[in-house]
Image (spheres, grey):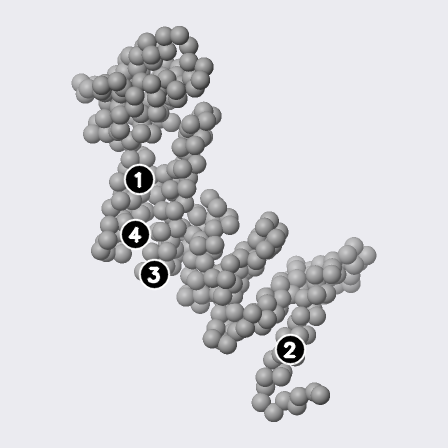
Amino acid sequence: MALSGGGATLGPRQLGGAKPRQVLLALCLHHGAGVSKTRLVELLWGSAAPHGATATLESYVSLLRHRLEPLLGTTASPVRTMPGGYRIDLDGVDLDLARFERLLRLARQPGTDAAVALSRYASALSAVQAPLLPEEDAAWIGETREAHDSAVLRATLEAAELALAAGAHGQAERWAAQALQRDQFSESAWLVLLRSFELRGQHADGLRAYESCRSLFAAELGCPPGARVREVFPRLLGADEHHQDDDLDELLDAVFRLHLALAADPARDGVGTPRAPGAADAGLLTRAFEDDSSRLKQLLDHVTRQLPGTPVSA
C-alpha cells in the first residue's frame, strides 16, 4: 500500500497506526460507497469491540485525515463524512482497483471493436499486477483479496480468449500464461495456450505444453484434463481430427509420453548419444513405461489394420 500526491508519498506505517490504516482500506475497498460506523467497528474489532468504540473510530478518522494532509495541498480530504458513516471520494482519488473495474466495464461493452477492447483489457490488467495488500492479515481483507484474485483471473481469461479470436496470438499466450500463474488447473487458460500454438503451427511447443498439462492433472488431481483440452492433442500431432475415436486418442497420448521418456533416457548423454547404462538406470524402466510401450504396439497394429490391402489375421 502506498499513497502519493502533492509531491509526497506515504507508506502503510505513516497513517497513524494499524487501525487508522484499516479504516482507509475499508473505505477504499468499498469503492466510494458509504460504510456505516457500525460496520467499521465490526471490521476493526469484530466481536471484541471496546467500550466507546464509535468514539475511538471517530478519533481514528480525524487522525487519518491529518496524516493525509501532506498529499492534498489545498484539496479537501477524500475521506468524507456521511450520515452514520464515511466514504472515500473517488473524484479526488486515483484508486487502482477502481481504475481496473472502470476499464473492465469499458472492455466488456457489447459492440466494442476487438482492438479497442484488447487495449482496455491490457490497461485494466496492468493496474492490478501486484498482489492485493499482501502485508495485511485481517480476515475481511483476506476475503476481499480472494474475490479480487478471482476477478483478475476471470478478466485475464477473457482477455486471452479475445486475443486468440482476434489473431493476436502472442498476447493471447502471455495472458494465458499469467492466468496459469494464478490457477495452474485453469483448463480455459490451457486451451487458449494450446489453440494458439496450433494456429501458429508451433506443434512442438503445443505438444510440450499439452504434456505439461496432462502430467500436472495426473499428478495433482489423478485425472486427465477435460475433453476440450484433450481434443487439441491429436490435431497437434497432425492427426485427422474428424476420425479419432477415444481409444486411438488414448494411444496417441501414449506415443507422445513414450517419445518424451525416450528423449529423457539417461542412457543417452545431453546431445542424444547412446552411452552404456549403469545400475541406477534399471529403475527407470517402470511399469508405466512398459505399459506405454505395449500401447504403442497396439497403435501400430491399429494403423496397420486400416491400410489398404492389409491381410486380416484370423
Residue 18 seen in render: no
Q: Amino acid at mark 1?
A: Phe
Residue 214, image quadrant = bottom right
Q: Amino acid at mark 3?
A: Ala
The percent position of residue 291, horizontal first and vertical second, equals: 70, 65
Residue depicted at x 62% and y 79%: 302
Rounded to the nearest whole Å, what is the CA distance between mark 3 and mark 1?
23 Å
Residue depicted at x 41% and y 65%: 200
Between discs 2 and 3, the one toward the N terminus: 3
Question: Which residue is denoted by mark 2 in the rendering?
Answer: 300
SS state under label 1 = helix
**Rendered-image quadrant of the C terminus:** bottom right
Q: How packed is label 1: few (under 14 Cα within 10 Å), some, or many (20 or more)?
A: many
Question: Which residue is denoted by mark 3 in the rendering?
Answer: 165
SS state under label 4 = helix
Residue 100, disc: 1
SS state under label 3 = helix
How many numbered dots are placed on residues in this image? 4
Between discs 2 and 1, the one toward the N terminus: 1
SS state under label 2 = helix
Q: Is residue 233 left or right of residue 104?
A: right
Q: Amino acid at mark 4?
A: Leu
Rounded to the nearest whole Å, what is the CA distance between mark 3 and mark 4?
11 Å
Residue 297 or residue 206, whichever sits in front: 297
Residue 29, disc: none
- Disc 3, disc 4: CB below 8 Å? no
Question: Which residue is denoted by mark 4 in the rendering?
Answer: 118
Q: Amino acid at mark 2?
A: Leu
Rounded to the nearest whole Å, what is the CA distance between mark 2 and mark 3?
37 Å
